[in-house]
Image: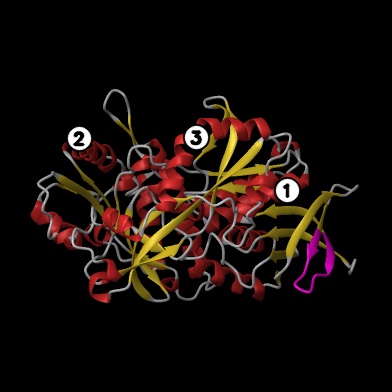
Amino acid sequence: MSNRETKTDVILIGAGIMSATLGTLLKELVPEWEITVFEKLENAGEESTNEWNNAGTGHAALCELNYTVEKPDGSVDISKAIKINEQFQLSMQFWSYLVNSKLIRNPQDFIMPLPHMSMVQGEQNVTFLKKRFEAMSNNPLFQGMEFSDDPEKLMEWIPLIIQDRSSNEPIAATKIDSGTDVNFGALTRILFDHLKSKNVDIKYKHSVDNIKRTNDGSWELKVRNDSGNVERHTAKFVFIGGGGGSLHLLQKSGIPEGKHIGGFPVSGIFMVCNNPEVVAQHHAKVYGKAKVGAPPMSVPHLDTRFIDNKKSLLFGPFAGFSPKFLKTGSMFDLVTSVKPNNLVTMLSAGAKNMSLTKYLIEQVMLSKEKRMEELREFIPNAKSDDWDSVAAGQRVQVIKDTEAGGKGTLQFGTEVISAADGSIAALLGASPGASTAVHVMLEVIKKCFPQHIKEWEQKIKEMIPSYGVSLMENEELLHEIHTSSAKALGLIEKELVSS
């Protein structure tokens, strides 16, 4: 056992997209700060961020129907879609800055232009989609969105989905060409290579066992390396970005803000097409509507993806249940996350979500043929031999007591929990996650370094021109940013060429 103690300015736990983004932002703002990263696996971006584990591939709220809700009066509320789109625009601006500053060489290694579509079946759903389209296409953020319920037009857009359909049920879709496919695993590895070149100390195969406050207000981490030796590391600021593993570390920190919070793990399975001829026939992200009783994270979608410079086709996700908080986690993760301070919260959530638990267990039990049946609602002539299943990453949904939902409310989002003095912050939750990483990390910076925000503001605006500005209310800036991001990231958008 080694008791070697190392002091540093900032410690980032977990080498995923969140730590990569925060580390890169801080290195631009204060290059002289010393940063150490601990990751228990061998490489960066191997857990939730990994491209095979990560369903969120450029969530800009262009096609996800669960971000737009039909209100009792029949109108469609698009406020959540607006919020997520504006947050995604911040990511695009930051990546553009990194490309323009030559910190990222080839943006096509992680981002590709790809139409985003929503598709629905049945008269009621078609009516909803039309209303959603009218609400969104009037908004500058969603300019260029098209709607069609004409079978010939749809055949042109999504031949794989439309051909060989025997049902006469009405079908409609919206399409917007300014969507993207983002490979967050690749982006994370690019950012960590960059951080390494900036003397950030990245320690792989290092697990953080414990975390506690020292007398001078710093944080001391007990870290176990791959030889089993224990090291002590202290820092003034710690960010816990360990995906599902964040909750246990937040609890160990003992901060009051981390109490009365639980986590509910959800696993997922994707079907991946192994037939290049089928893959070649589809070029879009197409989101459908979740089945009644299904959780928001299991909205079915048929996605073109670019992984390892190769076009792939994925369908899913089929939700599932495993008590692990990480893919490489332990079967005891869920049980050991229950503490006296969150027991009532967890029990209340269990009682409220019996139907969800039942749904997840049923999903785990689905045979391949049953999954193929669901896929055939998208691709009528899909053949079982052309598709394999791949286990996606673990998502841990936040459970907390809220005014609106009462005790033990399941949250479907990304949350940052930070200490009152800003010395530690933890990221919990799931979608839209990676896509809004830049927004989320700017929030961490604002909460945890309020004393520096004034002096950093100019640099933040240089990296992210719309920082602190609503793009929706500033069309000129929005157009400028769209054009400059598309150019920097190599995304040639049709609407920009025409306008």
- The amino acid sitting under disc 3 is Asn
Q: Which residue is mark 2?
A: 124
- The amino acid sitting under disc 1 is Ile
Say whether disc 1 or disc 3 marks the residue closer to the N-terminus.
Answer: 3
**Of tags 1 and 3, which is closer to the observer?**
3
- The amino acid sitting under disc 2 is Gln
Mark number displayed over residue 193: none
Any part of residue 359 in sight: yes
Residue 107 vertical position relative to residue 93 in the rendered view, above or below: below
Decide which of 460, 379 is in the foreground and name it.
379
Q: Which residue is mark 3?
A: 353
Q: How is the image coloured?
A: secondary structure
Determine whether, in the image, residue 86 is placed left or right of residue 153. Answer: right
Quadrant, the N terminus? bottom right
**Residue at figure coordinates x 16%, y 37% from the top left:** 123
Q: Which residue is mark 1?
A: 424
